[in-house]
Amino acid sequence: MKEASYRLRALLLGWGSVGVVYSTTDLLQRAGHKLPPLWFDSLTDFSPSAIWLYMSFFLLVPAGYWLTPLSQVKWLMRATQLAALCAGVIYLAWPTTMAYPAVSGEGISVEALRLLLAVDSPQNCFPSLHMALTLLMVWGISQRGQWRYTLTAVLWGAAISVSILQLRRHLFIDLVGGVALTLLAGMLARKMLSYRMIQKELNHE
């Protein structure tokens, strides 16, 4: 029960910070610079049916906090917070948007996409927090050292990455930015926790 409470608290503090930063920067930023698509973006066709893999991200994040080794949960929380903070700085300093395709037709996938469009920001494109958090969860789960969990997380993360492009919620360059953000936040979080551990040991001497 204590472990579950700890993981839940880390999830709320980590993922909650993303929601606060994402919504606040959307309100405060100026009109975004429109990013042009690259040749890689033309390799995937727009598909509203990708909404389901895209939205599975909202299952992957809790799974990441529950499956990451307990000793690494604090690192995951800090990395999530740092990713949100760094992305927020970029969103305010250099707001970005893109040309989104028109959504037409009928069906449950189209309706689900329309619901997403009604609540999601048309800005905050670069870097992609959707991509960054997906990779952080895969990184956390992989630290279990169990190949079945790692393989499942990697395949799930890869599917979400493709769905982001298929759904045209981000451009390829946004995903590249998300990867860089993941590495930066993950390494900074590791250094911060290591520094605090050293300071604790020094204080106890």
Image (spheres, helix red, strand yellow):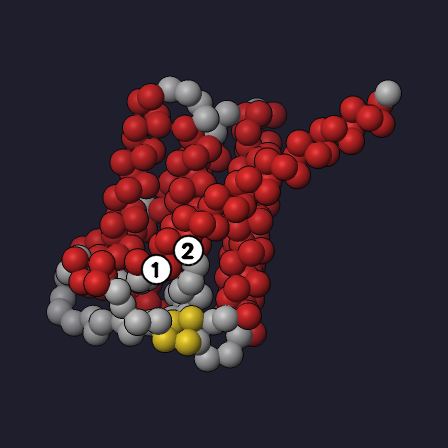
Q: CA distance from mark 1 to mark 2?
A: 6 Å
Relative side of 159 to 192, left or right = left
The image position of residue 22, as x and y in percent, is: 50, 61
Crowd around label 1: few <14 · some 14–19 · many ≥20 (10 Å): some
Q: How far across and how far down the image is residue 42, in percent? A: 18, 62
The three-letter code of the residue at mark 1 reads Ile
**Quadrant showing the N terminus:** top right
* Residue 82: x %, y % from top left: 58, 49
* Mark 2 secondary-structure assignment: helix
Quarter of the picture holding the C terminus: top right
Query: How far across and how far down the image is residue 196, in percent?
Result: 72, 34
Residue bearing the label numbered 1: 173
- Of residue 104 and residue 163, the one placed in the foreground of this image is 163
Give above or below for 174 relative to 179: below
Mark 2 packing: few (<14 Cα in 10 Å), some, or many (20+)? Answer: some
Q: Note whether residue 161 is visible.
A: yes
Kind of residue sitting beneath label 2:
Gly
Residue 193 lies in what quarter of the image?
top right
- Pointer 1 and pointer 2: residues touching (CB < 8 Å)? yes
Residue in the image at 42% along x and 71% along y: 96
Question: Residue 116, labelled with which disc?
Answer: none
Q: Residue at x 43, y 35 (%)?
A: 139
Q: Residue furthest toward the bottom? A: 31
**Secondary structure beneath label 1:** helix
> Pointer 2: what residue?
177
Closer to the camera in the image, 158 or 57? 158
Image quadrant assignment for residue 198: top right
